Amino acid sequence: MTKLNEWTTACAVCLLWVATSLASSAQTFGTLYSFDASDGHNPQDALVQGFDGNFYGTTYYGGTHNFGTVFKITPDGALTTLYSFCMETGCADGKYPGANVVQSTDGNLYGTTDYGGVYNGGEFFKITSGGALTVLYSFCAKATCTDGEGPYTGVIQATDGNFYGTTHSGGVYSSGSVFKLTPAGSLTTLYSFCAQSECPDGRTPTAGLVQATDGNLYGTTSLNGANGYGTVFKITTAGVFALVYNFCAETDCTDGKYPVGLIQGTDGSLYGTAGGGAYNQGTVFRLTLAGALTTVYSFCPQTGCVDGSDPRSGVIQATDGNFYGTTDTGGAYLEGTAFEITPAGALTILYSFCAQSGCADGLFLYAGLVQGTDGTFYGTTYKGGAHLDGTVFTLNTGLDPFVTLTPSSGIVHNIIGIIGQGFTGTTGVSFNGAAANFSVVSDTYLTTTVPATASTGPVTVATPDGTLTSNRPFLVVAKVSARP
């Protein structure tokens, strides 16, 4: 390397450090809670905000029997353990919840465990906000686990009211599956991976599904596909499967490999993270529903990966239109980062973990972020904290409060829920300017009916403290007429 190149590289690192320091000085980081063995430890998935304004999550270990927990935590940091797994003989109630719960339109929480259940293949469960757990389905109920085994990725509730997810293994070809579960626990296997020789359709899905505005489900496989490094796939709720993208289509996998996590951005494209990239330390990518991929950012262009490396989860899109996520390693202290990135690919490090003695602020970021309706970001670390068992943290970047919709699409006259804050005394709800009837359930939750004149666009709620706008537009779906 020439002296000029050395100087250029050093200056690039220096300028990045300065830019990062300046950007970070505007952020407020706080450790909301430090886990210990008794209340759970090692959370490894993102939090979800419930109708009550509190956050819900899981820990992989810890709790009464050290097989994991479901917990609730307030925005002020008061934690309640709702359930400790393996309360039943043989862990028939499940063990090791690797993914988070989701709150259904019925108000209950639904989730999966990686193992346990009647056949030790994992389970699908329902839990009330008070902590009463019901096992709805135990995987590996069929011979050679053709119904799937190891639902590592959790579930989503689609617009039809059913739950959809993937299993890491099992299925007809023992390479994972896509499934549908009714709220009552009736399972349909929609697809079994590796249906062809050498698995050109991919195998071993390790990230959850997302339902796009076209009504289809999209997900990733971590292995195989045409190039052997994972895929993005599309599947209808009826089980019609198609590949969207095969990773490592470019030399040295500069387009990424081993993808994790997808969301749909407000521009209609899918966004996610993967390994590989120009520096082999991970990427953020954009993928159109038609399958055209653009690498938005390749991590570690600087010495020491001060911009972060190895993203282990996907990104979210916040109310400012930018994307936010975490890396498991890299950063100023080599123990992970929280970052912001624009759709054009300009990256800012918001926080470098292990900045405090003994990593009291946490390390090992297996999970992504969630933006609370107060505008603040909330997240978890797998390790670190006061007891070295993981943390819940907050990161305030100054974004305004908003409301979120459950669900974010539907037909006119449907009833939907809105999560936010300060709803007591609300005077109006509108869908892209069309006034709607509503009912305030609590200060953090209200229900509303999609008006007949609604059109696709933002939903606004007029509260005594000001008007709150939804973080995503509501998609008005045309009602399909029944055939004569």
Image (cartoon, rainbow, N blue to C red):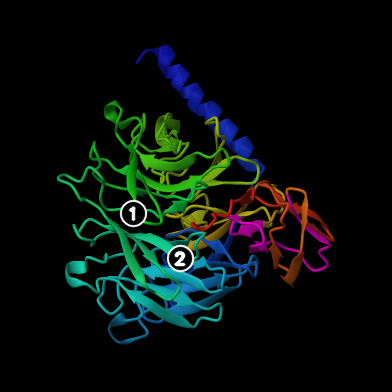
Residue 149 quadrant: bottom left
Q: Which residues are magenta?
A: 404-431
**What amino acid is at disc 1?**
Thr
- Taking depth in this image into account, of 25 and 185 the one nearest to the observer is 185
**What amino acid is at disc 2?**
Asn
Image: 317 above or below 146: above
Q: Residue at x 39, y 77 (%)?
A: 136
Residue of label 2: 162
In the rendering, at what x and y percent does residue 250 appear?
30, 27
* 430 is within the stretch colored magenta: yes
- Taking depth in this image into account, of 396 and 29 the one nearest to the observer is 396
Q: Is residue 43 visible from the viewing direction of this image?
A: no
Image: 383 above or below 96: above
Q: Residues within 10 Å of mark 2 (few under 14, many from 20)?
A: some
Lower sequence index among marks 1 and 2? 2
In the rendering, at what x and y percent does residue 135 appear?
39, 79
- Give the foreground label among 1 and 2: 2
Q: Are marks 1 and 2 in contact (CB under 8 Å)?
A: no
Residue of label 1: 206
Left or right: 149 in relation to 101:
left
